Image (spheres, grey):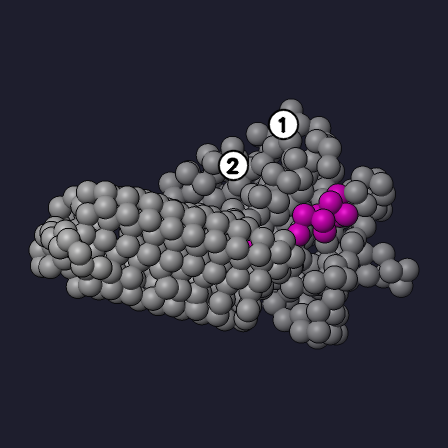
Amino acid sequence: MDKKFAGIILAAGEGTRMKSAIPKVLHPICGKPMLAYVLDLAKKLKLSKTLVVVGNKKELFKGLLDEYQAKAIYQDKRLGTADAVKRARGILKSFSGNILILYGDQPLLQAKTLKELMQKHLASCASATILTAAMEDPLGYGRIVRDNYARITEIVEDKDAANEQKNIKEVNTGIICFKKNGLFKAITRIRTDNAKREYYLTDAIKIMAGEGLVVESLCITVDPAQAQGINSRQDLAQAQKIMRLRILDKLIASGVSIVDPQATQIDYDCKIGPDSIIYPFTVIEKDVIIGKFCSIGPFCHLRPGTRVEDRAIIGNFTEVVRSRIGKDTLMKHFSYIGDAAVGKNVNIGCGTVTANFDGKNKQKTVIADSAFIGADTILRAPLKIGKKAVTGAGSVVTKEVKAGEVVAGVPARPLKFAPPKAGLI
């Protein structure tokens, strides 16, 4: 999309139904704040400017907005959506073009849908183009009211709708393209004569239609759930489910085998190589990279900072965090590896634990190529295990193990083997 559009993302809602001290739009979905998904859309659409209207706890937004190079606009009093948009007027004074209104609590929207909306807006030369959706249960949504010629005359909010209007199935998703000058001109005429005593942005549609200006629409016919807003924990859980299945579908299409998508959780932006297989009840959090031909799970937990190289096997009831697992390494059962660098062709025996926390700081464990870590070994970091070294079952290793050395015991000590006597096999 060309740069004829600026975006205003409305994200100042308090989200009282979430019952949370965290701003609603900062709640995570599959490892990423819901607002970040909307900022991603703005980035994909190559908007010339992205403005985000925030409310209370505006300091919590700074890091995320800086990451996306988006400009924050503060709405100190929640006077309605039209008031929120109006606050962007000064920043957009020198901008000539169109405005795309987005909402920070709609993370399921697809870029393809928004591109179609923007293209229709430009092609039709409309003053406003609304993204609508047909819903069997439109409760809570503004209804699209049309005249006998199917022209849009207004958007009526749910709380203000008359009984016959409540039966309308076509609803406003909130996403609207406006010509900039027409938008801000209409906003000056919006009043608060409604149930909530707020300045509704949707009233701009009635004003424009009343002046004979063209108001167009695009109805979502594929995946209407993408227009779903999030207002409660129940909505959040539903959005998590939809986003998770999208992530899994994308991985499956890239050549990853996921045995049971309904019982697998993988966060946004994780990378998994082709021909790897993910077994049920596996949780893979954000910032995890898995190579090719790997086997993960079942009942496995890979936390942020984990890197699993090609052909490694991470089995059942295992946890890995901030660690690299080398090629062809086996870690099949009941183990915890944290803050470690594990080399190639290493065997991590059942019950192995890296004791990486000394009470104040996380410490690192390094295990070199082809080492053999016996069952129930405790590795007290900071620690180095040399190439082809071996730890005996049940060992507590507190000191460096040299290459080829065999240690055992509590604490582990090197074992000395007497050379075979002459003539004996």
Q: Could you say where residue 321 lies in the image, as x and y percent from the top left?
A: 34, 52
Instruction: Please state which of the two labelled residues, at mark 1 or mark 2, is closer to the viewer.
Output: 2
Residue range in magenta is 107-118
Nearest the camera: 327 or 21?
A: 327
Main SS class of the magenta portion in the image: helix
Residue 78 circle label: none
Residue at x 31% of width, y 58% of height: 348
Q: Measured along the vertical axis of the image, is residue 220 above or below residue 263? A: above
Q: What is the residue that sits farthest to the top in this orientation?
A: 94
Look at mark 2 in the image and give the residue it sits on: 68
Which amino acid, mark 2?
Tyr
The span from disc 1 to disc 2 (Cα, nearest Å) is 22 Å
Mark 2 surroundings: few (<14), some (14-19) or many (≥20) residues within 10 A: some
Quadrant holding the N terminus: top right
Look at mark 1 in the image and give the residue it sits on: 93
Q: Could you say where residue 409 lies in the image, as x and y percent from the top left?
A: 11, 59
Q: Measured along the vertical axis of the image, is residue 89 above or below residue 149? A: above
For label 1, the SS is: loop
Q: Could you say where residue 227 lies in the image, as x and y percent from the top left?
A: 65, 59
Residue at x 67% of width, y 42% of height: 100
Tell me: 389 left or right of 69. Answer: left
Please tell me in which quadrant of the rendered image residue 211 appears: top right
Q: What is the residue that sits farthest to the front in this orientation?
A: 423
Which amino acid, mark 1?
Lys
Tell me: 337 left or right of 225. Answer: left
Mark 1 surroundings: few (<14), some (14-19) or many (≥20) residues within 10 A: few
Residue 374 in view in this figure: yes
Nearest the camera: 225 or 284?
A: 284
Q: Considering only order in the chain, which callout, 2 or 1, is on the residue closer to the N terminus?
A: 2
Residue at x 90% of width, y 60% of height: 149
194 in the magenta segment: no
Q: Could you say where residue 188 lies in the image, as x and y percent from the top left?
A: 65, 41
